[in-house]
C-alpha cells in the first residue's frame, strides 16, 4: 500500500489578469512533502506569476493559496543588478544581521567558498545564483521556488546545481528550459498552457512522450470532427432540398385538390409535413452547433507553432585563420595563451569554458577586421556576412519599434516579407509591429532577434548562449532551423542537449587560459 504524501501547500481556483488580459485561469493544485516539480510552459504563459502567487508575493484576483509553511523564492537572474562595486558582505548585511552564516551556508551547500570581500561585479552568473540559493536556505524553508536558475550557468555550476537539487530533501518547484536538468532532478512536471495547469508524473522525457500521445489523439479527433461536420453539412443541404421539394409538391396538391378531398385533411397533412421538417432541421442545426463548438475547443487547444528559416548560400573556402595568436583584454591581461584556429565555410563549432574564460571575447574577433584584441597572424577569406547574436540581444534597439528593428537589419526587405517572418515567429497582429522593442519580454525579444536574423543573408552565424530566455518549444524551432542552416555556425553554450541536436562537428574548450580541441564526452566527464 502506498503512503499518501503530506500536503504542504494548496491553491484553489486562482486567477490573475494583467491589464485585463487573463494570465492564469482557475488554477488549482497542491505541493506535498518531498515533491520535486518542474514547471514548464512557453514564455509569457504565467510561470513566474504562479510562483509569485505561491510565495504570497502576488495576490490572485480570485481564489486562494492555503499555506502555513516557510517559502523561499529565488527570482530570475538579472545580471545588470549585480554589476556593481558593492562587496559581498555589504550586499548581504543589508538584509541579514548574521550575514556571514550565508557564506557558511554557501560552502555547506556547494562545497566551495566565496570571499566576503569579493565585489559583486566579479562574480559569475553561477556564483550569483548559488549565493541567492544560499540566501534562500538561510530561513530553512520547507518549500523552495526557483525561477530560471539554470540561465547564465557554466558546466561546473550546472553540475553543482543538479547535485544540490538531486540530494536536497526540501520540496521545490523549478522553472527551467534546460532539458538535461529537468530530467535529472524532477519527478513531476507541471505544464502551464493557455492559463491552465496540467500535472504529469515523471521527468521531462516522460512528459514529452505522454504529451506527444495526447497531441496525436487530439489531432485525430480534430480531423474526425471536421469530416463529421462536412458530412453533416451535406446532410443538411440534402434535407433542405428534399424539404423544398416536398413543400412544393404539397402546395401543388393543395391547389389542385378536387371537391372530393377534405380541406381539413389536406391542411392536416400539410402541417404535419412542415412540423416534421422543422423538427429534423432543429435536430440537424443543434448537432451542427455542437460540432462547431467541439472543433473550436480542439482548435484552441492546438499550439501555435512558430517557424524560422535562416537565409544563406552554400559557400566553400576560408572564413578566417588564427596562427600562433594570443587573446588579451584591453588592459593587457591574457585571456587565451598561444593558440591556432581555422574556420571554413560550413563548419559547425562549439566553444566551452567557465564564465569569464574569454569565450565571448574570442568569438567577437571572428568578424572581418575585428581582431583588435588578438596578437598574431590573422587571415580572412573573401567577404562574408556575419551576424553575432549575444545572450542579451544587444543588436535589438529597445527605442525602435518591431518594424523599425526589422528594417534596420535589412533596408531592402519589403513589408510583406517582414509580415511573413514576424508571423512565423509569433508576432501575428498588425498592431504588434509598432510596439517598442523595449516593452517586449525576454522571450519576445529573443524571437524578434531571430526574426531579424531571418530577414537577411548570413554566411557566419555566431550564437552566444542562445537558449537563455527561450522556452523549450522555441528552442526546438531554433534547433530545426539551425540543422537546415548551410552557413557557418559557431555557438557558445553550456547546453549539451542543444549543441548535440544542432549537429556540432568540432568542440573547443578554454581551460586555464588554453584553447584546445575537445569533445562532448570529455566535457561531461571532466565536471
Image (cartoon, rainbow, N blue to C red):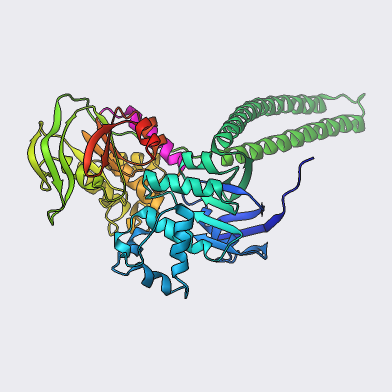
Q: Is residue 284 left or right of residue 370?
A: right
Stretch in magenta: 472-486
Using residue 498 as the reference point, say whether residue 366 is left or right of it.
Answer: left
In the image: residue 402, left or right of residue 109: left
Q: Is residue 202 visible?
A: yes
Q: Residue 14: image x %, image y %?
A: 64, 59
The location of residue 461, given as percent across then percent down, is: 25, 37
Picture quarter containing residue 331?
bottom left
The image quarter in which residue 230 lies: top right
> Does 225 appear above or below 181?
above
Residue positioned 42% across, 75% down in the render: 94
**Whether residue 137 is situated above or below residue 323 in the rendered picture:** below
User: Could you tell me if residue 458 is visible in this image?
Assistant: no
Quarter of the image holding residue 506? Answer: top left
- Relative to the observer, which residue lies in front, 491 or 105? 105
Query: Residue 53: image x %, image y %?
Result: 58, 61
Q: Is 482 covered by the magenta stretch?
A: yes
Q: Residue at x 42, y 44 (%)?
A: 426
Residue 287 x, y percent position in the rendering:
72, 35
The quadrant the N terminus occupies is top right
Q: Is residue 454 above or below residue 94?
A: above
Labels in figure, total: 0
Question: Looking at the rendering, in which quadrant would you find the C terminus?
Answer: top left
Q: Nearest the camera: 95 or 194?
A: 95
Magenta stretch secondary structure, dominant? helix
403 within the magenta span: no
Amino acid at each position: 500500500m502506498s503512503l499518501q504524501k503530506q500536503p504542504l501547500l494548496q491553491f484553489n481556483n486562482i486567477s490573475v489578469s494583467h491589464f485585463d488580459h487573463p494570465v492564469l485561469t482557475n488554477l488549482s493544485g497542491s505541493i506535498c512533502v518531498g515533491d520535486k516539480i518542474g514547471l514548464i510552459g512557453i514564455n509569457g504563459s504565467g510561470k513566474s506569476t504562479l510562483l509569485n502567487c505561491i510565495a504570497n508575493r502576488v495576490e490572485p484576483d480570485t481564489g486562494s493559496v492555503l499555506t502555513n509553511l516557510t517559502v523561499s523564492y529565488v527570482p530570475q537572474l538579472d545580471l545588470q543588478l549585480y554589476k556593481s562595486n558593492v562587496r559581498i558582505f555589504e550586499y548581504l548585511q543589508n538584509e541579514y544581521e548574521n550575514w556571514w552564516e550565508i557564506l557558511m551556508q554557501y560552502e555547506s551547500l556547494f562545497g566551495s567558498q566565496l570571499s566576503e570581500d569579493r565585489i559583486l561585479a566579479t562574480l559569475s552568473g553561477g556564483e550569483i545564483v548559488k549565493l541567492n540559493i544560499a540566501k534562500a536556505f538561510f530561513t530553512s524553508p520547507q518549500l523552495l521556488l526557483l525561477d530560471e536558475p539554470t540561465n547564465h550557468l557554466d558546466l561546473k555550476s550546472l553540475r553543482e546545481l543538479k547535485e544540490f537539487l538531486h540530494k536536497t530533501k526540501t520540496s521545490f518547484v523549478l522553472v527551467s528550459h534546460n532539458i538535461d536538468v529537468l530530467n535529472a532532478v524532477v519527478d513531476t512536471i507541471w505544464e502551464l498552457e493557455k492559463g491552465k495547469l496540467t500535472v504529469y508524473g515523471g521527468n521531462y522525457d516522460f512528459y514529452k512522450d505522454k504529451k506527444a500521445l495526447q497531441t496525436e489523439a487530439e489531432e485525430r479527433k480534430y480531423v474526425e470532427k471536421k469530416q463529421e461536420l462536412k458530412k453533416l453539412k451535406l446532410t443538411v443541404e440534402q434535407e433542405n432540398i428534399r424539404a423544398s421539394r416536398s413543400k412544393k409538391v404539397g402546395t401543388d396538391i393543395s391547389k389542385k385538390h378536387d371537391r372530393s378531398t377534405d380541406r381539413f385533411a389536406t391542411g392536416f397533412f400539410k402541417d404535419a409535413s412542415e412540423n416534421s421538417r422543422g423538427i429534423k432541421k432543429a435536430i440537424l442545426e443543434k448537432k451542427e452547433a455542437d460540432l462547431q463548438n467541439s472543433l473550436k475547443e480542439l482548435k484552441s487547444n492546438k499550439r501555435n507553432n512558430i517557424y524560422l528559416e535562416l537565409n544563406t548560400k552554400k559557400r566553400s573556402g576560408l572564413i578566417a585563420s588564427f596562427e600562433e595568436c594570443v587573446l588579451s583584454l584591453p588592459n593587457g591581461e591574457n585571456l587565451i595563451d598561444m593558440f591556432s584556429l581555422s574556420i571554413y565555410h560550413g563548419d559547425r563549432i562549439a566553444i566551452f569554458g567557465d564564465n569569464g574564460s574569454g569565450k565571448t571575447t574570442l568569438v567577437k574577433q571572428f568578424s572581418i577586421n575585428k581582431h583588435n584584441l588578438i596578437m598574431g597572424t590573422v587571415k580572412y577569406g573573401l567577404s562574408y556576412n556575419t551576424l553575432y547574436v549575444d545572450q542579451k540581444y544587444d543588436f535589438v534597439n529597445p527605442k525602435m519599434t518591431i518594424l523599425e528593428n526589422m528594417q534596420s537589419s535589412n533596408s531592402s526587405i519589403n513589408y510583406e516579407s517582414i509580415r511573413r517572418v514576424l508571423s512565423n515567429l509569433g508576432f501575428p497582429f498588425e498592431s504588434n509591429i509598432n510596439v517598442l522593442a523595449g516593452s517586449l519580454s525576454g522571450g519576445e525579444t529573443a524571437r524578434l532577434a531571430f526574426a531579424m536574423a531571418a530577414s537577411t543573408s548570413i554566411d557566419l552565424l555566431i550564437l552566444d548562449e542562445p537558449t537563455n530566455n527561450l522556452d523549450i518549444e522555441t528552442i526546438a524551432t531554433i534547433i530545426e532551423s539551425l540543422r537546415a542552416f548551410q552557413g557557418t555556425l559557431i555557438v557558445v553554450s553550456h547546453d549539451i542537449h542543444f549543441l548535440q541536436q544542432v549537429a556540432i562537428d568540432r568542440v573547443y574548450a578554454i581551460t586555464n587560459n588554453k584553447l584546445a580541441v575537445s569533445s562532448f564526452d570529455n566535457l561531461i566527464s571532466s565536471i
